[in-house]
């Protein structure tokens, strides 16, 4: 167990998930430094956190020397590593670029952590994209990885480097394999994140695009629960290896649409398009290990999380559409 307060470094901390983790750390009274190259992260995601003393460093995890210098200056007790390229389709178009960030960038951060003698390295990974299509649904951590796209492969390679640094150098590493994360600050105008995109469509009076028949399932996890899982991993006594982080339940895209229909009095009918290469059919995670060893479990249901997401978009990005 760490001391009551810690110095935390959050890579990708201006992004959707990272900024929510930063907020959780600030609420706990911790000292936080964020490093982000701001290609997808947004400075405004940290406005409140910066007012509360968070330092934002504009930098890139692909710059090994800069990351060593940063960790040497900050001397963090914990590194929360979220900086990554996360778009499956982009990874198929540019697998080398994906690996440069997700694999080499992770190696750079692990080496910086080793040199700075960081107490623990908490690595963000992915559940569905690593396991691929499998008959074991919900899927336990013991399931052999079988990625269907370079994104999942790059995340699996990053996991193996976390394990290597633990065995070779004694660096305390923890891997959190997320389900499909959604919630406030996810980009409703981006290419990834079906929940945010559909919530944005709902507020703009647009119909949702469904790739395939809509019966594909995901383990949707609210970002506030994900932030809590990261704090739990930072505070737990000597955790190691991979932990599935999700609700442990399958929810189909058609079920998501049905929930969203209940939040509007306008037509909200799917526009079906052909399925996309590299995407899995079913995904849910066995989350027993996180509950038993980290003392964590998801608290926010999918209907409640969608209501919160729509509300945040209504008050923020799409305020003009709600008047």
Image (cartoon, rainbow, N blue to C red):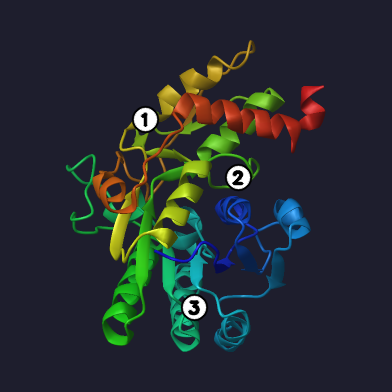
Q: Position of residue 271 (x, y in %)?
A: 52, 26
Kindly tell me whether residue 136 is visible in this rendering.
yes
Q: Position of residue 211 (x, y in %)?
A: 45, 35
Indicate left or right for 105 with 15 as reference.
Answer: left
Q: Which residue is mark 2?
A: 186
Q: Residue at x 40, y 33 (%)?
A: 212
Between the C-alphas of marks 1 and 2, the distance is 19 Å
Give the mark toward the camera: 1 or 3. Answer: 3
Whether tag 1 and tag 2 are in contact, CB under 8 A, the answer is no
Q: Which residue is mark 1?
A: 251
Q: Residues within 10 Å of mark 1 (few under 14, many from 20)?
A: some
Q: Residues within 10 Å of mark 3 (few under 14, many from 20)?
A: many
Identify the image quadrant of residue 103.
bottom left
Q: Residue at x 78, y 26 (%)?
A: 321
Q: Residues within 10 Å of mark 2 (few under 14, many from 20)?
A: many
Element type where label 3 sits in the image: helix
Q: Which residue is mark 3?
A: 109
Q: Residue at x 59, y 37 (%)?
A: 197
Q: Earlier in the sequence, mark 3 or mark 2?
A: 3
């Amino acid at each position: 167990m760490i001391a009551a307060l810690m110095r935390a470094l959050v890579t990708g901390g201006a992004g959707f998930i990272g900024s929510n983790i930063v907020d959780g750390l600030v609420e706990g009274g911790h000292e936080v430094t964020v490093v982000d190259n701001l290609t997808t992260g947004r400075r405004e995601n940290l406005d409140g956190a910066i007012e509360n003393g968070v330092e934002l460093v504009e930098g890139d995890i692909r710059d090994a020397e800069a990351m060593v210098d940063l960790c040497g200056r900050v001397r963090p007790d914990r590194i929360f590593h979220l900086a990554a390229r996360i778009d499956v389709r982009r990874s198929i178009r540019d697998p080398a670029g994906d690996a440069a960030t997700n694999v080499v960038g992770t190696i750079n951060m692990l080496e910086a952590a080793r040199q700075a003698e960081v107490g623990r390295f908490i690595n963000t990974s992915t559940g569905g994209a690593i396991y691929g299509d499998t008959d074991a649904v919900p899927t336990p951590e013991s399931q052999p990885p079988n990625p269907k796209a370079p994104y999942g492969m790059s995340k699996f390679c990053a996991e193996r480097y976390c394990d290597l640094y633990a065995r070779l150098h004694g660096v305390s590493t923890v891997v959190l394999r997320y389900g499909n994360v959604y919630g406030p600050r996810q980009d409703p105008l981006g290419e990834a994140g079906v929940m945010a995109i559909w919530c944005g469509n709902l507020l703009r009076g647009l119909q949702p695009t469904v790739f395939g028949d809509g019966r594909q399932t995901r383990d949707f996890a609210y970002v506030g629960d994900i932030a809590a899982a990261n704090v739990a991993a930072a505070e737990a006594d000597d955790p190691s290896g991979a932990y599935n982080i999700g609700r442990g339940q399958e929810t189909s895209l058609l079920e998501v649409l049905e929930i969203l229909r209940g939040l509007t009095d306008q037509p909200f009918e799917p526009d079906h398009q052909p399925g996309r290469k590299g995407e899995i059919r079913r995904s849910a995670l066995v989350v027993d290990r996180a509950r038993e060893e980290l003392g964590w479990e998801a608290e926010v249901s999918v209907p409640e999380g969608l209501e919160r997401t729509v509300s945040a978009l209504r008050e923020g990005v799409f305020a003009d559409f709600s008047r």
